[in-house]
Image (cartoon, grey):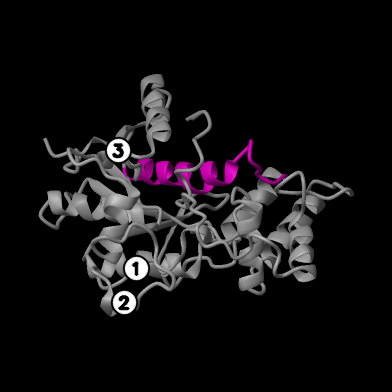
Amino acid sequence: MNPYRIEGPALISFSGGRTSAYMLFQILLAFDGKLPPDIYVVFANTGREREETLRFVYEVQTRWNIRIHWVEWTPAGFVEVGYNSASRNGEPFKALIGEKQFLPNAVTRFCTQELKIRTMRDFMRAAGYDHWVNAIGLRYDEGSRVLKALARNEAGKERFTTVMPMARAATKVTKRGHIMPFWFGEGVDRVPNPIPLAPDLPQGFDLGLQDYEGNCDLCFLKAKGARKRLIRDNPGMVDWWKDAEMFAAQVANKPSGARFVTEHSYADLEREVRENPFMPGLLDDDLEYDVECGLTCAPMEEAA
């Protein structure tokens, strides 16, 4: 049985990264290019996705002739947006911080849980489903995450059953063996630097980001060195994160301040980069990160 021929009702969780796009392509092939009406492709936008990510999602839906539902969290429930109307300055994320009155962190990762997982859940419930299949882009070489997803299925606490077709396929999908060659050509096992121009790529387009850059621009789960490099290379990117820390301190009435990471603030990172922009390790191109938001964060207990 072809694991990419998933059964509806189903939600294909599209992160906007290369791996989940590869999974979506294989699912489309399994259905001869046209998904059944009860299988939905959903992209949840936090407002801090890179512009390259938004463009990539748009390219996927137009080039592959597939409808992708763009959804965003609001305090009143999810809303559907599109490429042009999608938030680009962290509006959903900031509204969530205001509601919670504290910042997410490495232990309490409510940003992914609320802005992505539960927002996509609410989309499916609004479509009339109480239970469904949830297809996520975990590969065979992400064994520990695959096992955790299976354990959550066994627990039966969620409204959906997670399937991971890339981990089940007869040809076990890996990043180096399949994802990179799909986007960059046979024999390429990592993102080239520089990334080739679109006409020279096998699919005619690509995400256009190095692995360390990720989809969520300065996610606090990224290594400190990666965030420093991003701050140095992208003037102004850090401003939202500094403002979010100040905003969280104000709404929580914390004179001592608020931080995404206990050890340092984003203002601290910016200051370190300004004082020493060529620090050791900052130019290391060999670092690899799994950057697809929603897959790095295991869901917390599902309550509804």
In x, y percent, where is residue 57? 36, 64
Q: Is residue 225 visible?
A: yes
Residue 148 shown left or right of residue 280 in the figure: left
Label 3 to label 2, Cα distance in Å?
29 Å
In x, y percent, where is residue 232? 66, 70
SS for callout 3: loop
Q: Is residue 151 above or below residue 82?
A: above
In x, y percent, where is residue 145? 42, 34
Closer to the N terminus: mark 3 or mark 2?
Answer: 3
- Which residue, given by chain and number where applicable, does mark 2 sit on? 198
Q: Residue drawn 14% across and 58% down?
A: 33
Q: Is residue 41 visible?
A: no
Of 111 and 216, which appears nearest the observer?
A: 216
SS for callout 1: loop
- Which residue, given by chain and number where applicable, does mark 1 sit on? 206
SS for callout 2: helix
Which amino acid type is marked by label 2?
Answer: Ala
Label 3: few (<14), some or many (≥20) within 10 Å?
many
Which residues make up the magenta segment? Answer: 102-127
Which amino acid type is marked by label 1?
Answer: Asp
Q: Are the residues tagged 2 and 1 within 8 Å (C-beta)? A: yes
In x, y percent, where is residue 112? 53, 45
Residue 201 shown left or right of residue 300 in the figure: left
Q: Residue drawn 40% across and 70% down?
A: 55
Occupied quadrant, residue 48: bottom right
Q: Residue drawn 42% across and 32% down?
A: 144
Occupied quadrant, residue 28: bottom left
Q: Residue drawn 41% across and 69% down?
A: 208
Label 1 to label 3, Cα distance in Å?
23 Å
Does the magenta segment cover residue 265? no
- Which residue, given by chain and number where applicable, does mark 3 sit on? 164
Q: Are the residues tagged 3 and 2 within 8 Å (C-beta)? A: no
